[in-house]
Each structure stands twice: as C-alpha cells, then as structure tokens.
Image (tube, rainbow, N blue to C red):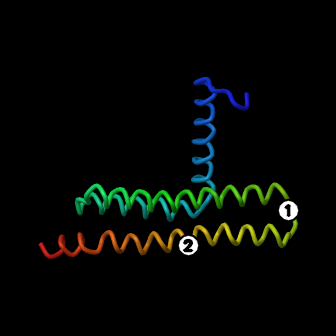
C-alpha cells in the first residue's frame, strides 16, 4: 500500500499527519508559546485590517515557525528512539534542530515588526 492512490489511502495519510500535529502540540511545550503568539498576531492583523499581501506574509511567517517546531519535535522523538545514552552526533542534530526553531522565530519577529510597524502607528495616530 506504499503508493496507494485511492481516497482511503489519502484519507489515512491526512489522518496520520493530523495525528502527528496534535501529538506534537500536546507534548511539546514550545507550542504553548508559539500558538498563543500566532493567535495574537492574527487578531492584531485583523484589527489593523491587513491587506492581502501582509496577510500572506504573516501566515507564511507563522507557518515557517510552526513547521520548524514540528520538524524539531520529530527530530527529538527520533533521537530518543535511536539512543537513550549520550551521543554527540544526536546532540549536534538536536542542537541544530533547536537552532532552526530559534532562527525561524527570530526572523519571524523581525518580519512581524516590519509588517505591523506602519499599520500600528497609522491606527494609533487615528
């Protein structure tokens, strides 16, 4: 069933993918920071009436951070399955995964400031 093109095959793939997302959200504490901040950013964008381009950039930026966090969570889970003892190679891989989340979050913050700066001050001044 590896290349099963039937709808049930695709439905199963989607079900498994959503199961993985929900598991990561329930078990990874970083999502308790990322998801509320994403909700605040989305609410603020709605309040400031972002145009279509700003919405697209905002959603892509949020998506980048969440995807980085999901991949890092997958890497952490796999590392635990591979070796319970200290392993310098796994440590490096986990550090790089965490670095990807940090880098995406930092870039998201910069992009967020750029997206919100002018609309916020225009709203504030009115």
Q: What secondary structure is found at the residue carrying circle 2? A: helix
Q: Earlier in the sequence, mark 2 or mark 1?
A: 1
Q: Is residue 62 above or below residue 117?
A: above
| Neighbours of disc 2 within 10 Å: few (<14), some (14-19), many (20+) | some
Q: Using the image as rendered, state which of residue 61 and residue 81 is in the foreground.
A: 61
Place of residue 13 in the rendered image (x, y in percent of width and height, measured from the top left): 62, 35
Quadrant in the picture for residue 103: bottom right
**For the C terminus, which image quadrant?**
bottom left
Place of residue 52 in the rendered image (x, y in percent of width and height, measured from the top left): 28, 55
Q: Which residue is mark 1?
A: 84
| Left or right of residue 69, residue 115 in this image | left
Residue at 45% across, 69% down? 108
Residue at 45% across, 60% down? 62
Q: Is residue 100 above or below residue 20?
A: below
Residue at 59% across, 52% down? 26
Q: Using the image as rendered, state which of residue 118 and residue 74 is in the foreground.
A: 118
Q: Which residue is mark 2?
A: 103
Q: Are marks 2 and 1 in contact (CB under 8 Å)?
A: no
Quadrant in the picture for residue 56: bottom left
Residue at 72% across, 60% down? 76
Place of residue 21 in the rendered image (x, y in percent of width and height, measured from the top left): 58, 48
Residue lying furthest left: 126
Quadrant in the picture for residue 101: bottom right
Place of residue 105 in the rendered image (x, y in percent of width and height, measured from the top left): 51, 70
């Amino acid at each position: 069933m590896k290349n099963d093109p039937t709808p049930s095959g695709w439905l199963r793939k989607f079900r498994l993918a959503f199961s993985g997302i929900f598991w990561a959200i329930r078990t990874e504490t970083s999502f308790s920071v990322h998801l509320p901040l994403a909700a605040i950013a989305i609410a603020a964008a709605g309040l400031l009436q972002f145009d279509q381009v700003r919405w697209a950039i905002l959603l892509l930026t949020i998506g980048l951070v969440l995807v980085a966090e999901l991949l890092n969570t997958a890497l952490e889970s796999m590392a635990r399955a591979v070796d319970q003892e200290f392993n310098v190679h796994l440590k490096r891989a986990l550090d790089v995964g965490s670095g990807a989340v940090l880098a995406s979050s930092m870039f998201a913050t910069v992009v967020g400031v750029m997206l919100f700066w002018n609309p916020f001050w225009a709203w504030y001044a009115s």
